[in-house]
Image (cartoon, helix red, strand yellow):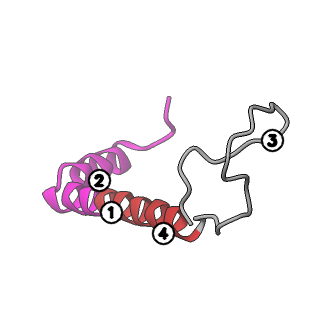
Amino acid sequence: MTGLSSRQHSERARWLSKPLFWISLAVIFVVVLIAANAHLVIVAFDSQPDCVPHDKVADGSTTHMRAAKSGC
């Protein structure tokens, strides 16, 4: 049992059947989706690492790593 009277239940059913409610819900969903994707793009560009010193020549040693492709 939901605890709603028949009048409250009919008002709720009437509100959920209105197209404005569903359009508003869809618009809110799209805005949140766009904002989340924009945030991911901004964070991706802001977190690009700077150039760091690294070995440019492979010496065959396993203790020294070098970049596969230098970005500097």
Q: Position of residue 14 (x, y in %)?
A: 22, 51
Query: To which residue does mark 1 refer?
Result: 28
Q: Position of residue 33 (x, y in %)?
A: 36, 57
Between label 4 and label 3, give the one nearer the viewer.
3
Q: Amino acid at mark 1?
A: Ile
Q: What distance separates the C-alpha of mark 4 from that of mark 1?
A: 21 Å
Classed neighbour count for the residue bearing mark 1: other residues with Cα under 10 Å, few (<14), some (14–19), many (≥20): few
Q: Earlier in the sequence, mark 2 or mark 4?
A: 2
Q: Earlier in the sequence, mark 3 or mark 2?
A: 2
Between label 1 and label 3, give the one nearer the viewer.
3
Q: Earlier in the sequence, mark 4 or mark 1?
A: 1
Q: Quadrant of the C terminus?
A: bottom right
Q: Decide which of 11, 70 is in the foreground and name it.
A: 70
Tell me whether circle 4 and circle 1 mark residues in contact (CB < 8 Å). Answer: no
Q: Position of residue 71 (x, y in %)?
A: 53, 61
Q: What distance separates the C-alpha of mark 4 from that of mark 3?
A: 33 Å
Q: Residue at x 41, y 66 (%)?
A: 38
Q: Earlier in the sequence, mark 4 or mark 3?
A: 4
Q: What distance separates the C-alpha of mark 1 from that of mark 3?
A: 51 Å
Q: Decide which of 72, 29 is in the foreground and name it.
A: 72
Query: To which residue does mark 4 refer?
Result: 42
Between label 4 and label 1, give the one nearer the viewer.
4
Classed neighbour count for the residue bearing mark 3: other residues with Cα under 10 Å, few (<14), some (14–19), many (≥20): few
Q: What distance separates the C-alpha of mark 2 from that of mark 1?
A: 23 Å
Residue 9: in magenta span = yes
Query: To which residue does mark 2 refer?
Result: 11
